[in-house]
Image (tube, rainbow, N blue to C red):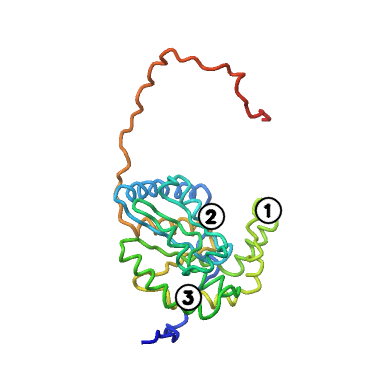
Amino acid sequence: MAADKSKPKKKADESEHTGSPTHKRIEREVYEAEVQKLQVELVKLQEWIKHEGLRVAVIFEGRDAAGKGGTIKRFTEYLNPRVVRIAALATPSNREKTEWYFQRYVEHLPAAGEMILFDRSWYNRAGVERVMGFCTEDEVWDFFRACPEFERMLIRSGLILVKYWFSVSDEEQERRFQARVKDPLKQWKLSPMDLESRLRWVEYSQAKDEMFSYTDTKDSPWWVVNADDKRRARLNCMHHLLSTISYEDVTPKDLKLPGLPPDRGYVRPPIDSQTFVPEIF
């Protein structure tokens, strides 16, 4: 029987509801105290994942300058990079362009005792690649057909998959772009793709709405993070992930350092035999 090449049936369009935050801005002292509490819990979650051999994949998607990178940085600040890793894939190589689309992402999926944070993911096909013309419409529709089943396969295998979409208004995105232009520490974040995206706001919105209509499923829902306020977005996202995965505190208790052993006559080499970094400060 010939394969069915008809396009999948669409669900009703869903708009991206964004706007200025309705809450008063969180003071820095309060924010930092809350972040620290959540980071302590993330350490406990990390140890539980390692203890139980869980496999966790967390996807961070959203518009440019929506705050995904800053949130990921707060997630991982005190975590073990051997347990919690970031997957931020570069442009596919010529070889990767000939592979099955999901293939280069599969090799970054977690093994037992690992959590992988995807700073953008296989959803590039439905977003950047589609809007910028890096793939064909047939490839997009193939993605819409395959992606839900691909994710169901991952979940059936025991993998815990959590997907976050960082939603930012056009006004706030513009403000962040302007701030990057003025800050030499952030100018590297303005790639040619970011600059082009300014001209394609509507196209990106339409692509996101259609992507949600096919991939926001009961098995693997999208969790939308209101990201106009970075501090609230980070706290809300960290809190949500911790509430999504059941864990227990298995961190070591009452750690005690053993005493230092005797030197056994060890003599250090002369200090002037070593090469030191010049002390400028």
Q: Are marks 2 and 3 in contact (CB under 8 Å)?
A: no
* Quadrant assignment, res 115: bottom left
Name the element at disc 3.
Answer: helix
Q: Is residue 63 left or right of residue 35?
A: right
Q: Amino acid at mark 3?
A: Met
Q: Is residue 112 left or right of residue 82?
A: left
Which-is-in-front pick, marks 1 and 3?
3
Is tag 1's residue or tag 2's residue first in the polypeptide sequence?
2
Residue 96's spot in the image, x, y percent? 52, 64
Q: Which residue is mark 3?
A: 211
Residue occupying image coordinates x 33% and y 29%: 256
Q: Amino acid at mark 1?
A: Asp
Is tag 2's residue or tag 3's residue first in the polypeptide sequence?
2
Residue occupying image coordinates x 49% and y 54%: 72
Residue 18's spot in the image, x, y percent? 53, 70
Question: Which of the image's four quarters has the C terminus?
Answer: top right
Q: Are marks 1 and 2 in contact (CB under 8 Å)?
A: no
User: Could you classify mark 3 by the number of other residues whose Cα lies within 10 Å: few (under 14), some (14-19), or many (20 or more)?
Assistant: many
Whole-angstrom CA distance, mark 1 to mark 3, is 33 Å
Residue that lies at the very extreme toward the top in this rendered image: 265
Whole-angstrom CA distance, mark 1 to mark 2, is 16 Å
Residue 95's spot in the image, x, y percent? 54, 64
Q: In the image, is residue 238 above or below residue 29?
A: below
Residue 21's spot in the image, x, y percent? 53, 65
User: Could you classify mark 2 by the number of other residues whose Cα lies within 10 Å: few (under 14), some (14-19), or many (20 or more)?
Assistant: some
* Image mark for residue 67: none
